[in-house]
Image: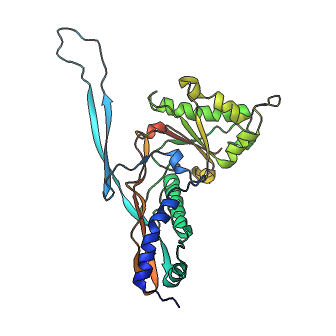
Amino acid sequence: MFAFDAQQALGFLISQTSSIEAQVYEIQYPDIQYPALVPVDTSANPWANSVTFYSTDKFGQAEWFNHQSKDMPLADVERAQHDHPVEMAAIGYRYTLQELGQAMMVPGTNLSADRAAAAIRAYEEFMDGLALRGVPPSGTGKNWTGLINNPIVSAGLVANDGAGASTLWADKTPDQILRDINELLTGVYQESLTVEMADTLLLPVTRFTSLADTPRSGTSDTTILEYLRRSNTYTAVTGAPLTIRAVRGLETAGGGNTARMVAYRRDPQVVRLHLPMPHQFLAPSQSGPLMFDVAGIFRTGGVEIRRPKAFRYSDGI
């Protein structure tokens, strides 16, 4: 007959957690999108209440000048401070005394990492949603937006010259679709006074799939997507490939719940996801007479778009 007290069970759980954590933090989830879409910044102090950054704007213009004049044209720099809040969230897992006792009955038995993996999965899903859509104000007291719905980014409808004066790509020719995309890319370049160029294009999953399946023309063996990768405004100007990704949530992200595409420059000077404290498990603790918890916490400030002119949305596709 085996008998285990709570202290023995807790010691057994503590001895197992380092191995469990090593396993689950190595897991890659291919459908988690945010690390590929936005630079993740972990540089701030893990316990900081906010992240502070400074933006600068240069102004001044050279003019013709007479050597006897005293009215010298001057250049200057305008500097502004911005504070971005950081908040804590949590997800952990639990074992009961019975579960630990049964695992301890057989020497050399290891606890399954399934529950820890479920906690990490929940964390990654939370961060994915936060990065893309932010946090709605209802019930949270927060009103954070994400990569695809920030109100400081310019947004507009694509041309309504499809069949029946439609904006939908389903009603447009390949030439019109390509034009819509290149107008979005060009819009970033023009609105920023040729300072910014979007190197990343995000499309709703259904629109991406359609581009990948639809021939460029009735006589072409090239799809619209293949043609777009070779022939787009960004690639034409820079010679570099345009990153094109299918992203969940864009089907209804546009005005009036329409489909939206997003163009932006993926650079930490433009946009970043603040994650001062990535998810970490704390030491196991006894939370009740027969329960043992492994708490997991993380602290994040969500997505911050620092240079909105390097972003642009087009809706109605």
User: On the rendered image, what quadrant is the C terminus found in?
Assistant: top right
Residue located farthest toward the top when viewing the structure as drawn: 67
Q: Residue 88: horizontal and vertical position, in percent?
A: 39, 63
* Horizontal arrangement in the rendering, residue 41 relative to residue 162 (left or right): left
For the question of whether residue 176 can be seen, the reply is no
Residue occupying the point 70% across, 41% down: 169
Left or right? Give the position of 141 relative to 128. left
Residue 199 lies, in percent from the top left, at 53, 34
**Residue 105 versus residue 285: which sits nearer the camera?**
105
Q: Locate residue 252 relative to residue 50 in the image: left or right.
A: right
Farthest residue in the right direction?
219
Q: Is residue 41 above or below residue 160?
A: below
Do we see residue 308 in this rendering? yes
As drawn, 111 above or below 208:
below
Name the residue located 83 percent from the left edge and 28 percent from the top edge: 219
Using the image, determine if residue 212 lies above or below residue 118.
above
Q: How is the image coloured?
A: rainbow
Outermost bottom residue:
1
Q: Residue at x 31, y 36 (%)?
A: 56
Instruction: Choose top left, top right, bottom left or bottom right for residue 48.
Output: bottom left
Position in image of residue 61 (x %, y %): 31, 21
Q: Is residue 50 left or right of residue 281?
A: left
